[in-house]
Image: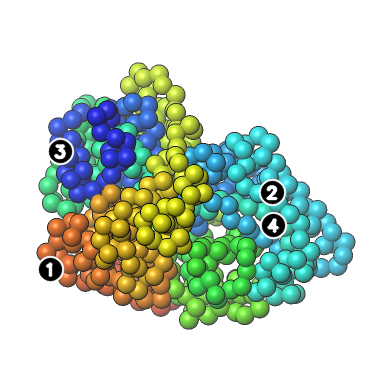
Amino acid sequence: MRDASVSRFTAGRLGPQRRAADLARLRSERFDVLVIGGGVTGAGAALDAAARGLSVALVEARDLAAGTSSRSTKLIHGGLRYLEQFELPLVHEALTERGLLATRLAPHLVRPVPILLPLPTGPLPVRAVRRAYYGAGVALYDGFAGLTGQGRGMPGHRHLSRSAARRRFPSLRPDALSGAIQFHDGQVDDARLVVTLARTAASLGAAVVPSARVVGLRRRSREVTGARVRDLESRAEIEVSARTVIAATGVWSDDITAMLPDAQPGLRVRASKGVHLVVPRAAITGEAGLILRTPTSVLFALPWGGHWIIGTTDTDWSLDRAHPAASAHDIGYLLAQLNQVLSRPLTGADIEGVYAGLRPLLEGEDDTAENSTLSREHAVVEPMLGLFLVAGGKLTTYRVMAADVVDRVAHRLGVVRPSPTARLPLLGADGYRAMWRDRPALAARSGLPTGAVEHLLERYGSLAPEVAALAAADPALAGPVAGAPEYLAAEISYGARAEGALHLEDVLTRRTRISIETLHRGEESARPAAELLAAELGWSAADVDREVAHYLARVAAERESQRMPDDQTADAARHGAPDVRGAADLAGRS
Ligand SMILES: Cc1cc2nc3c(=O)[nH]c(=O)nc-3n(C[C@H](O)[C@H](O)[C@H](O)COP(=O)(O)OP(=O)(O)OC[C@H]3O[C@@H](n4cnc5c(N)ncnc54)[C@H](O)[C@@H]3O)c2cc1C
């Protein structure tokens, strides 16, 4: 429960003292809800429960969003292709969430991104039929969002001739399309969304503890009453007492039920690997994204600040779940698919970053089902009294998943309070639009260039002045991060001071995206960033060396894995770098 004497902004700051205080709470309190897993689902569930006035603890084995939730295509979308599969309720639900996020809950994090759907070439009658078919689909997509959704928050679609499409996207090969339809979806930095959700939960009184792994469940007879949690920073074990437990552990869902050998079957979650490439914006000339059909699924090329994100693949993965590895085969596939429509083909030399994530797919009855036909919907089950598993779904629908699982929890606790999260803006949303309008004034007050203030507003919303104040107070923090001029040094410090970052990797891969947005993959930023963190986290010179060594080993292992021909060899190469938190047991093969 929130302490009314502390402001919400202060309460939402996840710094080292706050972590120590929350660890003390884990030892002493009996929580209404313990949430396991700090991805988008767990952070969303913690927020939902805290917003209903329940006492909540959230524990995450590694860093917030370290699992799938920092490795997505970063779209807040209904999923145009699910429309084609007639998954109409799923699309409608996701478009409603898209509208809510873009207009009310997180307008500072979710922005419209224009996407071109190229129309294939062919004889005139075939072209006309295809334009009518795709046009009807996109019109239905927009109609769902605009007529029955929560206010679209996105511009409507537009038909483009071939020449108009090529003006929007000059890198498209002239013979690759007969025209296009432009529509919009939402784009988000997924890891920042998760951190903002966790901070909003903390601002409402939730204890939020990253680097805390559940190693066992506590039970009394046939009822779950909490969990045994290992603090991966101190190696201490804590018995956490809770009336109910939510496991939002994505592709690790089966591991939680395995802790209770006599529980009913939980969720069967299959992992499907999706790989993305990041290339510089200059490598492709275009002002909108692209959605392309591939033999198995769809491929996106999306503008992402000074870069493009290209993805994704969709293949079964049963190796290391903590560090899914992209192979040379995955990379070659993505390049080959996109190069079919580009006038200047991309090569490996264009690639700045590569990342791989695992979709938590709910397994259907048919074990042989292709990944793309497995359910994208979510499910909540209670395999033992007091333990709720929630998995599936997607980033876009985290709020619906959270409300569903907390409804079940509230019912068990005898609490009759509906989810208020559809009306609860995330931290940084309130006042964001006014601040955006007044950004020259904020720039003048903080002494930062307007461009830097815009960058901060788009990442922190109305909390941007907190970061600007760090820069104003210390000239060393007002400059760019070494090797990553898009970011301010103050953002590294703020990551540790307010956003729960505990290790160098946390700030280079998730609080910022330096690890995938630079050709050096953060190697040049590692030591200067570690020195900034040392001041916040009290690190010694030896700690700095250890953190830098860990990060460089991780980059080297990832590069090596990306040269390997297939999943097995890529996985073996990725094992060259140990986890900085020593959470080797999370790697567990499925
Ligand atoms: C390639 C790809 C592209 C995608 N693109 C999109 C997209 O564009 N839009 C969209 O809406 N969705 C997208 N998705 C889907 C979306 O990213 C996922 O559905 C979502 O991130 C899953 O979140 P989660 O919280 O359930 O799982 P995770 O993010 O994996 O979180 C689970 C967490 O549980 C923690 N954990 C596990 N075991 C324990 C334990 N014992 N103790 C403590 N913590 C534990 C893990 O460390 C992890 O952080 C994509 C997915 C992939 C893979």
Residue 491 appears left or right of 83: left
Horizontally, residue 185 falls left or right of residue 484, namely right
Q: Quadrant of residue 31?
A: top left
In this view of the protein, which residue sits in the foreground, 104 or 416? 104
Instruction: Provide the residue designation for mark 3.
Output: 24
Q: CA distance from mark 4 to mark 2?
A: 9 Å
Q: Could you classify mark 3 by the number of other residues whose Cα lies within 10 Å: few (under 14), some (14-19), or many (20 or more)? A: few
- Where is residue 483 drawn, in percent x and y? 35, 74
Residue that numbered label 4 is attached to = 182
| Pick the front one: 31 or 115 | 115
User: Is label 3 or label 2 in front?
Assistant: 2
Number of the label disc, if any, that sits on residue 156: 2
Answer with mark 4 or mark 1, whichever residue precedes in sequence.
4
Does label 4 or label 2 sit earlier along the sequence? 2
Q: Is residue 296 visible?
A: no
Residue annotated with mark 1: 541
- Quadrant assignment for the N terminus: top left
In the drawing, does residue 557 fall left or right of residue 401?
Answer: left
Rendered residue at 63%/52% (across/down): 184
Label 2: state its secondary structure: loop
